[in-house]
Image (cartoon, rainbow, N blue to C red):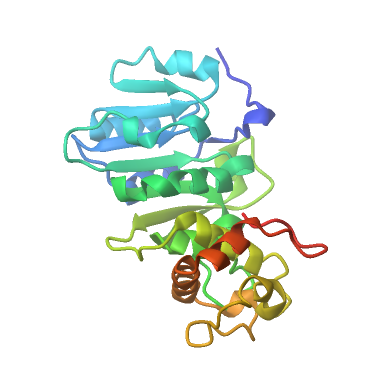
Amino acid sequence: MRHLPRKRFGQHFLADRSVIEAIVAAIDPRPGEALVEIGPGLGAMTDPLVARAQRLTVIELDRDLAARLRRRPELDVIESDVLRVDFASLPRPPGLKLRLVGNLPYNISTPILFHLLPWADQVEDQHFMLQKEVVLRMAASPGCKDYGRLSVMLQWRYDIESVLEVPPEAFEPPPRVDSAVVRMLPLPAPPDVDAALLEALVAVAFSQRRKLLRHTLGRWLTERSYGGVFDLQRRAEEVPVAQYVALATAVGGSAAAAASLAGSPPAPGLPLPG
C-alpha cells in the first residue's frame, strides 16, 4: 500500500538513488556496528544500510511505518518519538559506541540535536540530513551571520562538517528548502563544564545578538570581575566557543553568579535563560 506523507511528522521521503548511494558511502556502515537510524520512513536509506551492516536499529514514530518495518527480521524497531528515547538503553554489542544516522524531520531537527547532546560520549559519529540553513548554523565560525546558540552548543561537543548538499527534487514530496548531510564527530576530550549552565549563558548572550554583551550578560556578572577571562565589549557572534566555555567554567565557580544566571528575572524584552 502507498504511504501518504504526513505533514504533522514533517515527512519528506528521500527518493533519488544517486543521493542515497552518496550518503551511505559517506556513512560507510560495517557489519557488527551499533547502527541506529532515526526516522527510516519508507526505508530508502534503511535498505542499503542494512545490506552493509546486516542489522540495524530504527526509531520510527509513525505507527503504520513502524508496523511495516517490524516485518523485517534484520531490524530492531523502536516505535517512539525520538525526543523520548533514552539512547543509553539502545541495544548494542558490548564495548561499541552508537553510530546515528537519519533524515531528521526538519520541524524538530534542532530539538533532536539538543536531545542527543547528553549521550555524545556514547556515540562514535552522527550523519544527519537536515535543512541546509541549519547545517550552515551548526558549522558556522565566529563572525559569520549564521554563528549562534546552535553553533556554540554543538561545537562544544562535536567536530562538525557538511559533507553533501541535496536539492529539493531528491525528495518526495519536495521540501521548500535545500538540504545537506552533516557529519558530527564527538570530541574525544571535551571541556569539562556544566552543560545546563553553558546553555543558559549562551541563550542569554544571543538573546539580543546586535547588542554588546555587557547589556545582556553584564547584569548577571557584575558581582565578580571576569576581565581576565571574558571581554563583555563584544557582540555574542564575535566570541569563540572556547571562550564561552571558559566563562561558563568561571561562572560555575561562583555560586552567586551561577544562581543568578539560572534564575534571575529578565530585563524587559529579554527572555529567560535556557
Q: Nearer the viewer, residue 97 or 235?
A: 235
Q: Which of 106 and 13 is in front in this view?
A: 106
> In this view, which residue lies farthest toward the right?
268
Image-based side of 175 in relation to 136, left or right:
right
15 versus 60 height, above or below: below
Point out residue 264 in the picture as x, y percentages from the top left corner: 68, 59
Q: What residue is at 38 percent from the left and 48 percent from the top?
A: 126
Q: What residue is at 44 percent from the left and 45 percent from the top?
A: 116
Res 77 seen here: yes
Q: What residue is at 24 percent from the left and 34 percent from the top?
A: 53
Point out residue 266 in the picture as x, y percentages from the top left corner: 74, 61
Image-based side of 1 in relation to 124, left or right:
right
Q: Which of 250 and 174 is in front in this view?
A: 250
Point out residue 52 in the picture as x, y percentages from the top left corner: 25, 35
Looking at the figure, which quarter contains the C terminus? bottom right
Question: Within the image, what quadrant is residue 31 found in?
Answer: top left
158 versus 215 height, above or below: above
Image-based side of 31 in relation to 215, left or right:
left
Question: Within the image, what quadrant is residue 40 found in?
Answer: top left
Res 144 seen here: no
Q: What residue is at 68 percent from the left and 80 percent from the top?
A: 214
Point out residue 246 in the picture as x, y percentages from the top left corner: 44, 74
33 versus 263 height, above or below: above
